Image (spheres, grey):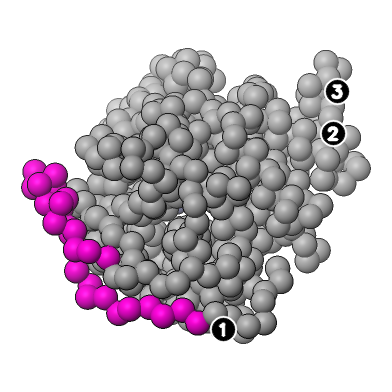
Amino acid sequence: MAHPRVLPSLILLAAASIFPIHTGAQAKSKAAAAPPPAAAAAPVSPDAAVFQLQSEALAWLQALIRINTTNPPGNEIVAAKYIADILQKNGIPSEIFESTPGRGFLVARLSSSAVPDPSRALLLMAHLDTVGVDKSKWSVDPFGGIVKDGTIYGRGVLDDKGPLVANLAAFIALKRTAARLNRDVIFLVEADEEDGGEFGMKFAVEQHWDKIACGFSINEGGETVMKDGKVWYVGIQAAEKVASNVAVIATGTAGHASMPTKNNAVVHLSAAMAKLGEWQAPVQFTAVTRAYFQGLAAVEDTETAKWIQMLESPDRGDHAARYLSNTNPFWNATLRDTVTPTMLQAGIRVNVVPSEARGNLNIRQIPGNQINDLISTLTKVVNDPQVRLDLQPGGREASPNSSLDSEFYRAIVKATATSFPGANAIPMMSPWATDSDRLRMRNVQAYGVIPFPLSETDYTRMHSDDEQIPVDSFNKGIAFLYTIVSGFSVAQ
Ligand SMILES: [Zn+2]
């Protein structure tokens, strides 16, 4: 985007890094003890604010990468305090709520009126924790916050510290421009997303809903996809699959390996896992996945588009689904429930036949499908009285889809057209889980957008090695997110 040549100087008052941290039962009473925020600087124009924030935001991202929040143990509060300090310096008070020592969430609000209307409020959310690293596979220090050849590297730059910083920059831009808001905008950073959310979003939603109650939210989960040097489409996550784990347990007679028998548990488990790995659930469409494929047909090459358009035709549908599933694992995961063998466990000694062998299936279902129905189907697929399937605890309930016609969805589509002319906005169902599900359960229209224009290869580095974002994409993402947020929340 174009930037003004002359930037108004912005004087930031260095503020003492004092902010309230609420723990357990004291939370409510301490909330009133927030120190007064630093004085705000004179308002700047949106273009100037975004331009200025782009360079500040890179330093924030580097600093956040250097704060190791690998979960477990998380230690997210250290990062939350760093963010509280940035907000404080920008004249925005924030509160930190601890779910357990060292973990919890930070929340801040820009109010539109004296009487808040939670049903209109927009929540900008992201998580502070990251998955771990295999340092030996990285070309740079994953916690160094290193910028090399115009690219920033580090664990969490994509998932989810980069998107977090984009939210923070958009939020601060509203403040610096003294935007006249038509709804409250709430900024939330939370914990424990990578390990179930018990100490993060579950805690926030169940115990402090009053702090984050909203009608609309933006979170990770989508993608802004580049191809041939320009934005190809923006995938807006409007639904997510539901994960469960099912143990596959084979039992047999223990004995000496020198005298094998037919009921060896290892053999029965292996046969069962092979059948389960081959099995495919039938193709199914929801409002979101149908719209996803329609949107994709408009941007894909002619050959692929032809098969996408055939997906629901009675005579060619099966062939089209097979072709598309084999072409792209994401399409396969969008078309059906998936059943993925992930673990095997058997035996204690090389010469002993064990009495039990266990495997694990990681299952991702289209929202609305029932896990018990799938387990009975899979039990028939295995068809072995020595093998049983046991649902493991820890599964989440299915959340409803977000609307593809809400005012916020339309605002994201409009911002896409403004920021990336020619690019389509396409709704999607993510096969991965995000914390948006807990909001959708509370009737929030929640959407996932990662605003940084990246190649499909860049996106595969989430949870993997050398996670990275070109600084140019990072800057474009900040501007895009600000366009979305300001377009929806600033009075015209
Ligand atoms: Zn994430």
Note whether 67 is above or below 449 in the view shown: below
Local crowd size for mark 1, using a 10 Å CA cut-off: few (<14), some (14–19), many (≥20) = few
| Residue assigned mark 2 | 307
The one nearer the camera, 375 or 115, is 115
- Identity of the amino acid at label 3? Arg
| Residue assigned mark 1 | 148
Q: Residue at x 54, y 49 (%)?
A: 490
Callout 3 secondary element: loop
In the rendered image, residue 208, in percent from the top left (x then y), is placed at 24, 40
Q: Is disc 1 in contact with disc 3, using a CB cutoff of under 8 Å?
A: no
* Tag in front: 2 or 1: 1
* Tag in front: 1 or 3: 1
Callout 1 secondary element: strand
Note whether 230 is above or below 5 in the view shown: above
Q: Left or right: where does residue 378 sit relative to residue 343?
A: right
Q: Left or right: where does residue 301 sit relative to residue 29?
A: right
Q: Residue at x 56, y 53 (%)?
A: 486
The one nearer the camera, 188 or 324, is 188
* Rendered-image quadrant of the N terminus: bottom right
**Res 316 label:** 3
Q: Is disc 2 in contact with disc 3, using a CB cutoff of under 8 Å?
A: no
Residue 398 is one of the magenta-drawn residues = no
Note whether 119 is above or below 228 in the view shown: above
- Return the disc, 1 or 3, that comes first in the chain's sequence: 1
- Identity of the amino acid at label 1? Lys
Q: Which residue range is magenta in the image?
A: 9-37
In the rendered image, residue 280, in percent from the top left (x then y), is placed at 62, 28
The image shows a total of numbered marks equal to 3
Residue 28 is one of the magenta-drawn residues = yes
Note whether 464 is above or below 492 in the view shown: below
